[in-house]
Amino acid sequence: MSSHPDSRADSRADSTAESQAAAAPRTGTRWLWFHKLSSPPYAFRTSGKLRPWFLWPALILMAIGLYGGLVLAPADYQQKDAFRIIYVHVPAGILSLQVYIVMAIAAAVGLIWRIKLGHALAAAIAPIGAWLTVLCLATGSIYGKPMWGTWWEWEPRLTSELIMLFLYLGYMALRNSFDDVQRADRAADVLAIVGVVNVPIVKYSVEWWTSLHQGPTFSKLDAPSMAASMAWPWVLMMLAFMLYCAAVTCDRLRTEILKRERNASWLGEQLKELKP
Amino acid sequence: MNLTTFFAMGGYGAYIWSCYGLTAAVLIFMAWRARSELKAEITRAQRRSVIAEQQP
């Protein structure tokens, strides 16, 4: 726990970034950006401004990636056209893990430094991760049927990804089981941090155990297992998924801040500028 | 390339298009849901602040 005089700044709901900066005169400017970033009014405004910059590039990249993946890329010599499922399956899977890492870091920041925005971000991002996990499992299942001859197999990769879904759902259920937001934050965010052990298990499950699931397709840069014409659409799709999730996170984070900052005085001024 | 062979996807059409359809549905739903929740919350907060201003 920090005795940094500025570390209390975040508990003042109505303090603006500017007044926080003024409140920390000699303690160094190193952490100023952090406290500015973590102040609810600043985050509320910034995420509103950033959203279109995430959303439109996401949609453009997705359109190009889809054309590249579905039309330009040649069929795989082994998996034929079915391999095209990876353009949605793999980004969903990778992001389901990345979103969890972001959620756990946000939860840790909220718990350790008592930064409210950390809790808010963790709460905002959890349903996104849950949906991506569902998407990964569902598309994987549809991919599995023609490739493996089964919709589901209790093997390491699939099982650990299913546990990922239960972690997300458990996190959301635990959060909803408290009426008090602060208690919900503490309990749910401890679960988020503990659950992060499952992330490397999912990632390395195909290497640690004998798995029906194929190994990573894109990580071998020195000896790529995929032709460039197949790989570039995937890179675009991956970026597009990340940007798209960032755009959704902007909206969800703003909703979460609004719910948590009900009585904050900064809200009144902001609300006048917003259209419903 | 004609459209029939494109949609057939070498016999894997049903698998591929259900995956892409599902992905589109989830992504659109996620964004729509986030947007509508934000709008509802803004309306609620604005109503609240109007009530607060009316009180002496």
Image: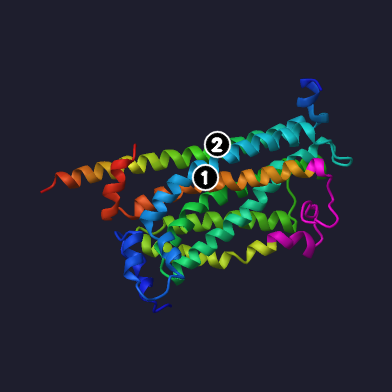
The part of the image, by quadrant, that contains residue A161 is bottom right
Side (left or right) of A38 relative to A66: left
Q: Residue A263: in sight, yes or no?
A: no
**Contact (Cβ within 8 Å) of mark 2 with mark 1:** no
Q: Position of residue A87 (x, y in %)?
A: 72, 42
The span from disc 2 to disc 1 (Cα, nearest Å) is 12 Å
Q: Which residue is mark 2?
A: B28
Say what secondary structure mark 1 lies in: helix
Q: Nearer the viewer, residue A205 or A249?
A: A249
On residue A247, the disc is 1
Is A218 within the magenta? yes
Q: Residues within 10 Å of mark 2 (few under 14, many from 20)?
A: few
Q: Position of residue A19 (x, y in %)?
A: 31, 63
Give the residues drawn in magenta, as a range.
A202-230
Q: Residue at x 58, y 35 (%)?
A: B25
Q: Position of residue A153 (x, y in %)?
A: 75, 51
Decide: is A4 above or below A104.
below
Q: Residue at x 59, y 40 (%)?
A: A57
Side (left or right) of A183 relative to A271: right
Circle 1: residue type:
Ala
Q: Residue at x 39, y 51 (%)?
A: A44
Subunit that carries the residue with mark 2: B
As drawn, the residue found furthest toward the left would be: B56
Q: Residue at x 64, y 63 (%)?
A: A198
Which quadrant would the N terminus of chain B be assigned to in this image?
A: top right
Circle 2: residue type:
Ile
The part of the image, by quadrant, that contains residue A6 is bottom left
Pair 2/1: label in front: 1
As drawn, the residue found furthest toward the right would be: A77
